[in-house]
Image: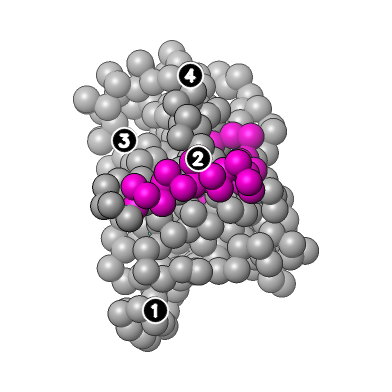
Amino acid sequence: MTLSDPDNILAGAFADLESGRLDKSLSTNESSQLSKAPVRNVYSIRRATLADSTMLESIEREAFPGMTPVTRIERDLKRQNGLYLAAVRDWHPDERELGPRFAISTQDEKDDVSFTARVKRNVDRYFLDYVNRPKLPYDYIAGFVGLWFVLDEAHIVIIGLRKADRRKGIGELLLISALEQAVENDSRVVTLEVRESNKGAIDLYRKYGFQEVGLRRRYYSDNGENAVIMTTSPIQSDDYQNQFKKLIKLHNEKWGRSSRLDKPEPEAKDAPENNGATVDGN
Ligand SMILES: CC(C)(COP(=O)(O)OP(=O)(O)OC[C@H]1O[C@@H](n2cnc3c(N)ncnc32)[C@H](O)[C@@H]1OP(=O)(O)O)[C@@H](O)C(=O)NCCC(=O)NCCS
């Protein structure tokens, strides 16, 4: 317990970091991989705009099948107290070959080989894309996070990725950026709700110091599942910031440094020669 953490909340949070589990998991196989980790992450984070809304809605359908809309993206993009961040990279040359409607569609829509799906794709490609061509974002969006700033809290209303882009550190990169924006916005804590069964997401949030503080019973209308309410300890505190910086450093070492909101990640001393086997010494 420290002065900035009088209730000792951080003791349970960042548990992996404290227990050295992250150190250990990085000590053998991963540390040798880390020395070969890319110096630059191909994904960067930028602010999402209204021009991205069709793409974001398609990602939302892919990330939350059967329960969209999770939130009203267009409305949120216009909110004064809202901020949406997108994880982006350059388009690969072949990704736009089959037309913008195909490029925007979900993985399930792309994989659907039924007769009707094939007819629809041809109508899209040879007719609709000509008469009313959807405007694609200038870059490929792998996923996004939406935030609302309410009083002294930042609330994560949505975070989701395309299926093909999961488990590549992009969700974590979005969460890092959301937390950084919450700090810049002088928010005190960050909160969110997550399905009880969504262990992957809960692990990600715990890694960043979120703790379960309550339950909303039968919150999700599709299957009546409970939502777990999770919140950070005060994000401006020295304790939180120290742990946060260590996690960012580990993420950089594993996935490469990324630019976030046009601020290039500084050419840090911690770059490639450090294989990430330790979280000490920023
Ligand atoms: C949840 C989600 C955003 C995570 O993004 P991601 O890019 O796949 O996750 P990352 O690769 O950045 O993983 C970061 C950490 O999250 C945890 N994690 C993420 N997915 C996990 C999974 N499927 N199983 C276990 N842990 C997982 C791990 O702790 C991981 O750290 P590690 O790589 O050191 O093990 C993504 O899977 C997604 O979009 N899911 C569908 C939508 C959704 O459930 N959103 C959350 C709603 S609250």
Horizontally, is 1 left or right of 260 in the view? left
Question: Which residue occupies 26% across, 52% down?
Answer: 114
Question: Which residue occupies 34% across, 52% down?
Answer: 117
Q: Earlier in the sequence, mark 3 or mark 1?
A: 3
Question: Which residue occupies 39% across, 20% down?
Answer: 37
User: Magenta residues?
Assistant: 117-145
Horizontally, is 244 left or right of 276 in the view? right
Q: Which residue is mark 2?
A: 126
Residue 33 x, y percent position in the rendering: 29, 21
Q: Earlier in the sequence, mark 2 or mark 1?
A: 2
**In front: label 2 or label 3:** 2
Q: Earlier in the sequence, mark 2 or mark 3?
A: 3
Residue 245 x, y percent position in the rendering: 53, 39
- Residue type for callout 3: Asp
Q: Which residue is mark 3?
A: 23
Q: Which residue is mark 4?
A: 39
- Residue type for callout 1: Tyr
- Residue type for callout 2: Tyr
- Residue type for callout 4: Val
Q: Secondary structure at mark 3?
A: helix
Q: Earlier in the sequence, mark 1 or mark 4?
A: 4
